[in-house]
Image (cartoon, helix red, strand yellow):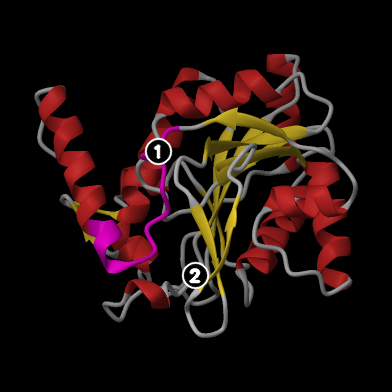
Amino acid sequence: MEPDSRIGRMSDWSILRATHRRPLRVALLPCAGRGERAGGGRPKQYVEVAGRSVVHWTLLAFDELVGQGQLDGVAVVLSPGDEEFVQAVPPALRERLQVMPVGGATRAHSVWGGLQALAREGLGDTDWVLVHDAARCLIEPAELLRLIVACEGDAVGGLLACPVPDTLKRADALGRVQDTVPRDHLWAAQTPQMFRLGLLRDVLGRALQAGIPVTDEAGAVEWAGQAPKLVAGPADNFKLTYPDDFRRAAEVLARRSTSIGTTP
Protein backbone atom coordinates (compact mmCIF):
# COMPACT_ATOMS: atom_id res chain seq x y z
CA MET A 1 0.00 0.00 0.00
CA GLU A 2 1.42 3.36 -1.03
CA PRO A 3 0.97 6.30 1.37
CA ASP A 4 -1.29 9.16 0.36
CA SER A 5 0.73 11.89 -1.33
CA ARG A 6 -0.64 15.38 -0.76
CA ILE A 7 2.19 17.69 -1.69
CA GLY A 8 1.22 21.35 -2.05
CA ARG A 9 1.57 22.75 -5.55
CA MET A 10 3.44 25.91 -6.45
CA SER A 11 0.19 27.83 -6.95
CA ASP A 12 -0.90 26.90 -3.42
CA TRP A 13 2.28 28.34 -1.90
CA SER A 14 2.07 31.44 -4.08
CA ILE A 15 -1.51 32.13 -3.05
CA LEU A 16 -0.69 31.67 0.63
CA ARG A 17 2.36 33.93 0.40
CA ALA A 18 0.36 36.68 -1.28
CA THR A 19 -2.43 36.33 1.27
CA HIS A 20 -0.18 36.49 4.32
CA ARG A 21 2.30 39.04 2.93
CA ARG A 22 5.08 37.26 4.83
CA PRO A 23 7.40 34.30 4.33
CA LEU A 24 5.56 31.01 4.70
CA ARG A 25 6.08 28.70 7.68
CA VAL A 26 5.94 24.96 7.01
CA ALA A 27 6.62 22.15 9.48
CA LEU A 28 8.66 19.19 8.24
CA LEU A 29 8.54 15.97 10.25
CA PRO A 30 11.01 13.20 9.36
CA CYS A 31 9.04 10.02 10.11
CA ALA A 32 11.19 7.41 8.41
CA GLY A 33 13.27 6.13 11.34
CA ARG A 34 13.29 2.56 12.61
CA GLY A 35 13.64 3.36 16.33
CA GLU A 36 15.76 0.31 17.14
CA ARG A 37 16.84 1.59 20.57
CA ALA A 38 13.21 1.78 21.66
CA GLY A 39 12.71 -1.98 21.26
CA GLY A 40 9.29 -3.44 20.55
CA GLY A 41 10.04 -4.48 16.98
CA ARG A 42 8.36 -1.54 15.22
CA PRO A 43 9.23 2.08 14.46
CA LYS A 44 8.78 4.11 17.63
CA GLN A 45 6.70 6.78 15.92
CA TYR A 46 3.95 4.19 15.42
CA VAL A 47 3.92 2.81 18.97
CA GLU A 48 0.72 3.59 20.87
CA VAL A 49 1.02 5.85 23.91
CA ALA A 50 -2.02 6.92 25.96
CA GLY A 51 -4.47 5.82 23.28
CA ARG A 52 -2.82 7.32 20.21
CA SER A 53 0.30 6.65 18.15
CA VAL A 54 3.34 8.74 18.97
CA VAL A 55 3.24 10.52 15.61
CA HIS A 56 -0.48 11.22 15.99
CA TRP A 57 0.18 13.07 19.27
CA THR A 58 3.03 14.97 17.61
CA LEU A 59 0.94 16.05 14.65
CA LEU A 60 -1.90 17.36 16.80
CA ALA A 61 0.20 20.27 18.11
CA PHE A 62 1.20 21.35 14.61
CA ASP A 63 -2.31 20.93 13.26
CA GLU A 64 -3.60 23.28 15.95
CA LEU A 65 -1.20 26.00 14.79
CA VAL A 66 -2.29 25.47 11.18
CA GLY A 67 -5.85 26.03 12.35
CA GLN A 68 -4.76 29.25 14.04
CA GLY A 69 -3.02 30.50 10.90
CA GLN A 70 0.42 30.44 12.55
CA LEU A 71 1.64 27.59 10.31
CA ASP A 72 0.91 27.26 6.61
CA GLY A 73 1.31 23.51 6.26
CA VAL A 74 2.72 20.30 7.69
CA ALA A 75 4.82 17.90 5.61
CA VAL A 76 5.69 14.38 6.74
CA VAL A 77 8.62 12.42 5.28
CA LEU A 78 8.06 8.66 5.15
CA SER A 79 10.18 5.75 4.01
CA PRO A 80 9.19 4.59 0.52
CA GLY A 81 6.61 1.84 0.88
CA ASP A 82 5.64 2.76 4.45
CA GLU A 83 2.35 1.01 5.24
CA GLU A 84 1.96 1.95 8.92
CA PHE A 85 1.45 5.70 8.71
CA VAL A 86 -2.07 5.38 7.30
CA GLN A 87 -2.98 3.16 10.26
CA ALA A 88 -1.34 5.42 12.83
CA VAL A 89 -2.95 8.73 11.82
CA PRO A 90 -6.71 9.24 11.33
CA PRO A 91 -7.91 10.04 7.79
CA ALA A 92 -9.26 13.48 8.73
CA LEU A 93 -5.83 14.54 9.97
CA ARG A 94 -3.96 12.88 7.08
CA GLU A 95 -6.00 14.91 4.62
CA ARG A 96 -4.49 18.11 6.02
CA LEU A 97 -0.89 16.86 5.64
CA GLN A 98 1.60 16.72 2.81
CA VAL A 99 2.91 13.16 2.83
CA MET A 100 6.21 12.66 1.03
CA PRO A 101 7.66 9.11 0.66
CA VAL A 102 11.24 10.35 0.20
CA GLY A 103 12.88 9.10 3.41
CA GLY A 104 16.56 8.19 3.34
CA ALA A 105 19.04 6.03 5.20
CA THR A 106 19.52 8.57 8.01
CA ARG A 107 17.49 11.33 9.58
CA ALA A 108 19.62 13.93 7.79
CA HIS A 109 18.98 12.27 4.42
CA SER A 110 15.24 12.17 5.15
CA VAL A 111 15.21 15.87 6.01
CA TRP A 112 17.22 16.60 2.87
CA GLY A 113 14.73 14.67 0.74
CA GLY A 114 11.86 16.58 2.32
CA LEU A 115 13.52 19.94 1.73
CA GLN A 116 14.15 19.05 -1.90
CA ALA A 117 10.52 18.02 -2.36
CA LEU A 118 9.24 21.24 -0.80
CA ALA A 119 11.51 23.29 -3.05
CA ARG A 120 10.35 21.42 -6.15
CA GLU A 121 6.75 22.16 -5.21
CA GLY A 122 7.38 25.91 -4.98
CA LEU A 123 8.33 26.71 -1.39
CA GLY A 124 10.75 29.63 -1.60
CA ASP A 125 14.28 30.06 -0.27
CA THR A 126 13.14 32.75 2.18
CA ASP A 127 10.25 30.67 3.53
CA TRP A 128 10.67 29.06 6.95
CA VAL A 129 10.86 25.34 7.65
CA LEU A 130 10.38 23.99 11.18
CA VAL A 131 11.98 20.54 11.35
CA HIS A 132 10.64 18.41 14.19
CA ASP A 133 11.28 14.85 15.33
CA ALA A 134 8.14 12.73 14.94
CA ALA A 135 9.08 11.00 18.21
CA ARG A 136 8.89 14.22 20.27
CA CYS A 137 5.19 13.78 20.93
CA LEU A 138 4.96 16.05 23.98
CA ILE A 139 5.52 19.31 22.12
CA GLU A 140 2.72 21.83 22.73
CA PRO A 141 1.38 24.58 20.46
CA ALA A 142 2.53 27.32 22.84
CA GLU A 143 6.14 26.13 22.54
CA LEU A 144 5.91 26.09 18.75
CA LEU A 145 4.56 29.62 18.75
CA ARG A 146 7.33 30.75 21.10
CA LEU A 147 9.93 29.47 18.63
CA ILE A 148 8.21 31.17 15.69
CA VAL A 149 8.01 34.52 17.46
CA ALA A 150 11.66 34.30 18.55
CA CYS A 151 13.04 33.32 15.14
CA GLU A 152 10.89 34.90 12.44
CA GLY A 153 12.91 38.13 12.57
CA ASP A 154 16.28 36.46 13.08
CA ALA A 155 18.94 36.49 10.37
CA VAL A 156 19.82 32.82 10.92
CA GLY A 157 17.02 30.98 12.70
CA GLY A 158 17.10 28.87 15.81
CA LEU A 159 15.91 25.92 17.85
CA LEU A 160 14.20 24.95 21.03
CA ALA A 161 16.75 23.81 23.62
CA CYS A 162 16.94 23.23 27.35
CA PRO A 163 19.80 24.31 29.65
CA VAL A 164 21.60 21.23 31.00
CA PRO A 165 20.81 20.92 34.74
CA ASP A 166 22.88 17.82 35.55
CA THR A 167 26.57 17.33 36.22
CA LEU A 168 28.09 15.72 33.12
CA LYS A 169 30.73 12.99 33.18
CA ARG A 170 32.88 11.91 30.27
CA ALA A 171 33.52 8.15 30.24
CA ASP A 172 36.60 6.27 29.11
CA ALA A 173 36.56 3.07 27.05
CA LEU A 174 36.11 0.98 30.22
CA GLY A 175 33.03 2.84 31.39
CA ARG A 176 34.79 4.77 34.13
CA VAL A 177 34.74 8.51 34.67
CA GLN A 178 37.44 10.23 32.68
CA ASP A 179 36.57 13.75 33.73
CA THR A 180 33.72 16.10 34.63
CA VAL A 181 32.47 18.37 31.88
CA PRO A 182 31.56 21.91 33.02
CA ARG A 183 27.88 22.46 32.29
CA ASP A 184 28.13 26.24 32.08
CA HIS A 185 26.52 27.46 28.86
CA LEU A 186 25.56 23.89 27.83
CA TRP A 187 22.13 23.34 26.31
CA ALA A 188 20.43 20.12 25.22
CA ALA A 189 19.14 20.59 21.68
CA GLN A 190 15.48 19.88 21.00
CA THR A 191 13.19 20.36 18.04
CA PRO A 192 11.60 22.07 16.21
CA GLN A 193 14.57 23.74 14.58
CA MET A 194 13.52 26.67 12.41
CA PHE A 195 15.55 27.85 9.43
CA ARG A 196 14.88 29.33 6.02
CA LEU A 197 14.53 26.73 3.29
CA GLY A 198 17.34 28.14 1.14
CA LEU A 199 19.88 28.23 3.97
CA LEU A 200 19.01 24.77 5.27
CA ARG A 201 19.03 23.13 1.83
CA ASP A 202 22.43 24.64 1.10
CA VAL A 203 24.23 23.80 4.34
CA LEU A 204 22.68 20.36 4.82
CA GLY A 205 23.41 19.37 1.24
CA ARG A 206 27.03 20.49 1.51
CA ALA A 207 27.50 18.79 4.88
CA LEU A 208 26.15 15.48 3.58
CA GLN A 209 28.29 15.70 0.46
CA ALA A 210 31.36 16.35 2.64
CA GLY A 211 30.58 13.32 4.80
CA ILE A 212 29.99 15.39 7.93
CA PRO A 213 27.96 13.52 10.58
CA VAL A 214 24.79 15.58 10.94
CA THR A 215 22.51 14.77 13.88
CA ASP A 216 20.39 17.91 13.70
CA GLU A 217 19.78 20.86 11.42
CA ALA A 218 21.46 23.36 13.74
CA GLY A 219 24.64 21.28 13.53
CA ALA A 220 24.73 21.72 9.76
CA VAL A 221 24.14 25.46 10.12
CA GLU A 222 26.93 25.67 12.72
CA TRP A 223 29.27 23.70 10.44
CA ALA A 224 28.67 26.38 7.80
CA GLY A 225 29.83 29.08 10.22
CA GLN A 226 26.49 30.45 11.42
CA ALA A 227 25.20 30.69 15.00
CA PRO A 228 21.58 29.57 15.49
CA LYS A 229 19.52 31.19 18.22
CA LEU A 230 18.72 29.18 21.36
CA VAL A 231 15.10 29.43 22.49
CA ALA A 232 14.29 27.92 25.89
CA GLY A 233 12.14 24.82 25.58
CA PRO A 234 10.45 22.67 28.23
CA ALA A 235 12.08 19.64 29.83
CA ASP A 236 9.01 17.60 28.76
CA ASN A 237 9.94 18.02 25.09
CA PHE A 238 12.13 14.93 25.10
CA LYS A 239 12.56 12.48 22.26
CA LEU A 240 11.16 9.00 22.85
CA THR A 241 14.25 6.86 22.41
CA TYR A 242 14.38 4.15 25.09
CA PRO A 243 11.60 1.91 26.48
CA ASP A 244 11.25 3.93 29.69
CA ASP A 245 10.61 7.11 27.67
CA PHE A 246 7.24 5.71 26.57
CA ARG A 247 6.16 5.25 30.18
CA ARG A 248 7.22 8.82 31.01
CA ALA A 249 5.37 10.17 27.98
CA ALA A 250 2.20 8.31 28.93
CA GLU A 251 2.37 9.82 32.41
CA VAL A 252 2.76 13.35 31.03
CA LEU A 253 -0.14 12.90 28.60
CA ALA A 254 -2.35 11.47 31.32
CA ARG A 255 -1.50 14.39 33.59
CA ARG A 256 -2.35 16.89 30.83
CA SER A 257 -5.65 15.16 30.10
CA THR A 258 -6.61 15.27 33.76
CA SER A 259 -5.75 18.96 34.01
CA ILE A 260 -8.15 19.87 31.20
CA GLY A 261 -10.81 17.33 32.15
CA THR A 262 -10.53 15.13 29.04
CA THR A 263 -9.44 11.61 28.21
CA PRO A 264 -6.78 10.87 25.58
- Image location of residue 151, percent across then percent down: 69, 25
- Image location of residue 233, percent across then percent down: 49, 32
Q: Name the mark on residue 50.
A: none
| Quadrant assignment for the N terminus | bottom left
Is 197 left, or right, of 20 in this rendering? right
Question: Residue at left 40%, top 38%?
Answer: 235
For the stretch drawn in magenta, the main secondary structure is loop
| Quadrant assignment for the C terminus | top left
- Image location of residue 86, percent across then percent down: 35, 62
Mark 1 Cα-neighbour bin, 10 Å: few <14, some 14–19, many ≥20: few
The local secondary structure at tag 1 comes to loop
Task: Name the residue that disc number 1 marks.
Answer: 235
Is 210 left, or right, of 235 in this rendering? right
Is 24 left, or right, of 126 in this rendering? left
**Nearest the eye: 174 or 212:** 174
Question: Residue at left 68%, top 16%?
Answer: 20
Q: Along the polypeptide, which appears first: circle 2 or circle 1? A: 2
**Nearest the eye: 177 or 216:** 177
Mark 2 Cα-neighbour bin, 10 Å: few <14, some 14–19, many ≥20: many
Question: Residue at left 44%, top 46%?
Answer: 166
- In the image, residue 225 above or below residue 216: above
**Residue 230 highlighted magenta (yes or no):** no
Inter-mark Cα distance, 2 to 1 = 23 Å
**Residue 239 highlighted magenta (yes or no):** yes
Q: Tag 1: residue type?
A: Ala
Quarter-of-image position of residue 231: top right
Viewer-nearest of labels 2 and 1?
1
User: How many callouts does the rendering have?
Assistant: 2
Q: Which residues are magenta?
A: 234-246
Quarter-of-image position of residue 41: bottom left
Task: Name the residue that disc number 2 marks.
Answer: 33
